[in-house]
Image (tube, rainbow, N blue to C red):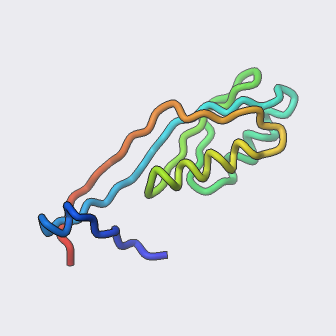
C-alpha cells in the first residue's frame, strides 16, 4: 500500500497535495451479555480503539485515510455476531497541505 495521496483537481491546479486523516466516533450496540467479548474483538481491528462500555453500548473511535475506509470498518463492525447496530456519531478530518513532488 502506498503512502501517496491521490491527486485531485484542486491539488493539480494549485500544485499542492492534501494529506487527510479521518477520525470518527461511533456507538456500537451489542447484546449486553456479550459486550465485553465484543469490545475485545473491536480492539483487535486495525484503526479501532475502544473507549468505554456500559450495558449494551460500546464507544469507539475509528481512524483511517478516507471516509470510505471508516465506512468499511463500520460495516464490518455492524456485521459482527452479537452486534445489534453500529452508528457513526461524529467525523473529523485533519488536513495537512504539502507540495506535490
**Side of 12 where 30 appears, left or right:** right
Q: Position of residue 101 (x, y in %)?
A: 20, 78
Q: In the displayed structure, does residue 57 sit left or right of residue 59? A: right
Identify which residue is drawn at 69% across, 53% down.
44
In the picture as drawn, the residue positioned furthest to the top comes out as 55
The vertical placement of 74 against 15, above or below, is above
Residue at point 34%, 69% (across, down)? 6
Exactly how many numbered labels are in the figure?
0
**Residue 21 picture location, percent across and down:** 39, 53
Q: Position of residue 85 (x, y in %)?
A: 71, 33
**Where is residue 71 drawn, in percent x and y?**
56, 48
Q: Examine the rendered structure and indicate whether residue 38 appears above or below residue 76.
A: above
Q: For the point 17% across and 65% down, which residue is it?
A: 16
In terms of depth relative to the viewer, which is nearer, 70 or 61? 70
Q: Is residue 74 above or below residue 58?
A: below
- The image quadrant that residue 78 belongs to is top right
Q: Residue furthest front?
A: 9
* Residue 34 versus residue 4 in the image, above or below: above
Residues 40 and 101: in front is 101
Query: Residue most toward the bottom?
Result: 101
Amino acid at each position: 500500500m502506498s503512502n501517496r495521496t491521490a491527486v485531485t483537481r484542486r491539488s493539480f491546479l494549485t500544485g499542492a497535495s492534501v494529506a487527510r486523516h479521518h477520525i470518527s466516533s461511533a456507538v456500537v450496540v451489542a447484546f449486553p451479555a456479550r459486550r465485553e467479548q465484543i469490545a475485545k474483538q473491536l480492539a483487535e481491528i486495525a484503526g479501532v480503539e475502544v473507549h468505554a462500555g456500559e450495558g449494551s453500548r460500546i464507544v469507539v473511535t475509528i481512524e483511517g485515510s478516507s471516509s470510505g475506509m471508516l465506512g468499511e470498518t463500520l460495516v464490518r463492525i455492524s456485521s459482527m455476531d452479537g452486534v445489534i447496530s453500529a452508528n457513526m456519531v461524529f467525523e473529523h478530518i485533519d488536513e495537512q497541505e504539502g507540495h506535490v513532488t
